[in-house]
Image: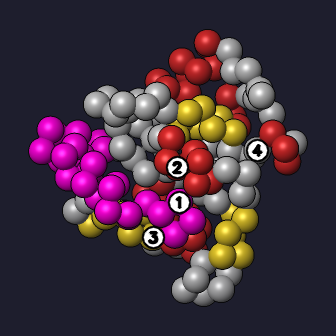
Amino acid sequence: MTTISVSLRRLAIQRADNRCEYCGISQIGQVATFHIDHIVPVVAGGETAAENLALACVSCSLRKGARQKLEDLETSEIVSVFNPRQQIWKEHFAWNGVQIVGLTSTGRATIQALDLNRLTMLAIRAEEELLGRHPPQT
């Protein structure tokens, strides 16, 4: 298990505005503490450094796991998982109410692999919308 320093953890949380960098839900109001995700997994040589860390809700972190490549089912293109340190969320995803829409192969493949529009996530986003926390202000 890789240890992440308190300062790196704080940086990741602050940089992400306390939101999952994949699905956008707020850590505020969630029961589980969000993970500090290695974008490039440690098993693939990813370092525990600021440029390789992202804040991820438990669901996104576990669904992503050590995956680096995904298939866009619409085009059959093999793409990398969305990288919040190197890519801009709004270039790959858009909001349609509480659903996330993929704008690119990377966006579509990430949505499918992480199951970003499953019923539980839609319900959480609907509740966040009522509380004024959705959509994220980015």
- Secondary structure beneath label 2: helix
Q: Which quadrant is home to the N terminus?
A: top right
Q: CA distance from mark 3 to mark 1?
A: 12 Å
Direction from residue 64 to residue 129 in the image, left or right: left
* Residue 116, horizontal then vertical, whole percent: 43, 60
Q: CA distance from mark 1 to mark 4?
A: 16 Å
Q: Is residue 107 above or below residue 8?
A: below
Q: Quadrant of residue 117?
A: bottom left
Q: CA distance from mark 1 to mark 2?
A: 6 Å
* Residue 61, horizontal then vertical, whole percent: 58, 45
Q: Which residue is mark 1?
A: 114
Task: Determine which of the numbered discs, if any, sits on residue 60 in the image.
Answer: 2
Q: Which residue is mark 3?
A: 102
Q: Residue furthest bottom?
A: 75
Q: Residue at x 22, y 43 (%)?
A: 128
Task: Determine which of the numbered discs, if any, sits on residue 41 in the image.
Answer: 4
Marks 1,2: beta carbons within 8 A: yes
Mark closer to the chain start, 3 or 1 = 3
Q: What's under tag 1, amino acid-wise?
A: Leu
Q: Is residue 99 above or below residue 64?
A: below
- In magenta, the rendered stretch is 112-137
Instruction: Give 79 or 91, whichever is nearer the viewer.
Output: 79
Marks 3,1: beta carbons within 8 A: no
The answer to if 40 sits in the magenta stretch is no
- Secondary structure beneath label 4: loop
